[in-house]
Image (spheres, rainbow, N blue to C red):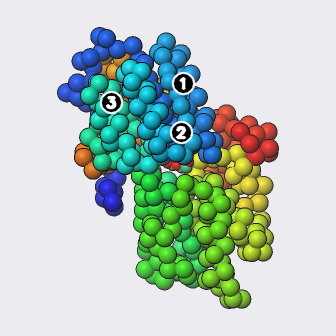
Amino acid sequence: MHLSRRGLLYGSAGAAAVSLAGCGAGEESASLTGFTGISMPTDTSERWVIEGKALESNLKGLGYDVIHQNAKDVVEDQIAQIQSMVDEGVEFLVIAAIDNTSLGQVLADAKDKGVTVIAYDRLILETPDVDFYASFDNYQVGVLQATHIIDRLGMRDNPGPFNIELFSGDLGDNNSQYFFMGGLDTLESFIYEGKVLIPSGQTEQEPTATAGWSGDAAQTRMSDLLGEFYDDDETELHAVLSPYDGISRGVVAALVDADYEPGTGGFPVVTGQDAEAASVKAIKDGTGQTETVFKDTRQLAHTVTGMVKAIVDGGDPEVNDLGTYDNGFKFVPSLLLEPVDVTADNYKEVIVDSEYLTEEQIDAGEA
Ligand code: GAL
């Protein structure tokens, strides 16, 4: 693991830009035109499609040429797409990796050609050739999810015990460990106290992982857990720590199949992330998960556009964390934004008033 459990301290996002004097990015600026390759990982989760388009239009709006491709979950395609961007002469690569350790070779080639590499939301590991990282405070995402469970079950004032199951994301995505660790650290004292039980005994990242962040895979695992560990009249499930809305909806489907009734007190608390329209609808209507973590991805795309522009203009990109994201070679200078907890109480203010989704999109369950 690259995560130090307590190593995520930094000043608040957006505050105090850290100067990167000496990184040298600006030195080549005279000849830079802003030509950028954008490589997105999947089109099954709506955010990557929206952000790919936002990045493309932001960069084109600055007059830069852009190649934008989505590798649709195929690692080899992502490598080939990036290689062809490098061959076309891009000066910048903005990459959300499918598999965080698969890009070493193509990035070595990019580096030889002087390309600046920005890891977009997902850190790229085991290569010296990543210059910057832009994301959210991923550990805090897990903290918010677990805190929702604690609050919703009234765990501080109620003796319990509460039965909880844990889900984590794709093992090839560096973010997964941060979400999981943030959640586990927050639940830790309740687990030690015996207030929280995990009947499956699956408390490590690997057995709880969800390949490809797939809702179907999550549904299957949840059904298996219910069949194996909750198949008597006494053992009731009280909450599921889920790291991402697509997984949460799979979990909810399995719970409904097993006759848990959404909207009733007996329905487990289910968390999520990304404020996908279908999940915000469930939160609003009380028909499934009760929480999601909103990451304003418009802000992320804007931030990364600003990084490219800063370098083209001969300056240094703003970062606010130099000591958290170790990619196996170095701590990658990072700009981390703040995630926001969303429930039925504040979805309107956070999601609708900010124009991230309209009420119509939420009611339709589609962005
Ligand atoms: C992660 C990302 C999450 C979610 C997930 C599945 O890398 O941080 O917000 O989108 O991928 O797409």
Residue located at (47% from left, 15% from top)? 64
Q: Circle 2 is placed at which residue position?
A: 71
> Camera-side residue: 47 or 196?
47
Q: Is residue 3 left or right of residue 38?
A: left
Q: CA separation, marks 2 and 1?
A: 16 Å
Q: Is residue 185 left or right of residue 361?
A: left
Tell me the amino acid under the disc marked 2: Ala
Q: Circle 1 is placed at which residue position?
A: 56
Q: CA separation, marks 3 and 2?
A: 18 Å
For the C terminus, give its image quadrant. Answer: top right
Horizontal and vertical percent for residue 68?
52, 27
Q: Is mark 1 within 8 Å of ligand 1?
A: no
Residue located at (47% from left, 77% from top)? 191
Residue located at (49% from left, 75% from top)? 202
**In the rendered image, the vertical position of residue 323 relative to residue 201, given as above or below:** above
Horizontal and vertical percent for residue 92?
39, 25
Of badges 1 and 3, the one in the foreground is 3
Q: CA separation, marks 1 and 3?
A: 20 Å
Q: Secondary structure at mark 2?
A: loop
Q: Secondary structure at mark 3?
A: helix
Q: Is residue 100 left or right of residue 294?
A: left
Tell me the amino acid under the disc marked 3: Ala
Dot label at residue 110: 3
Q: Residues within 10 Å of mark 3 (few under 14, many from 20)?
A: many
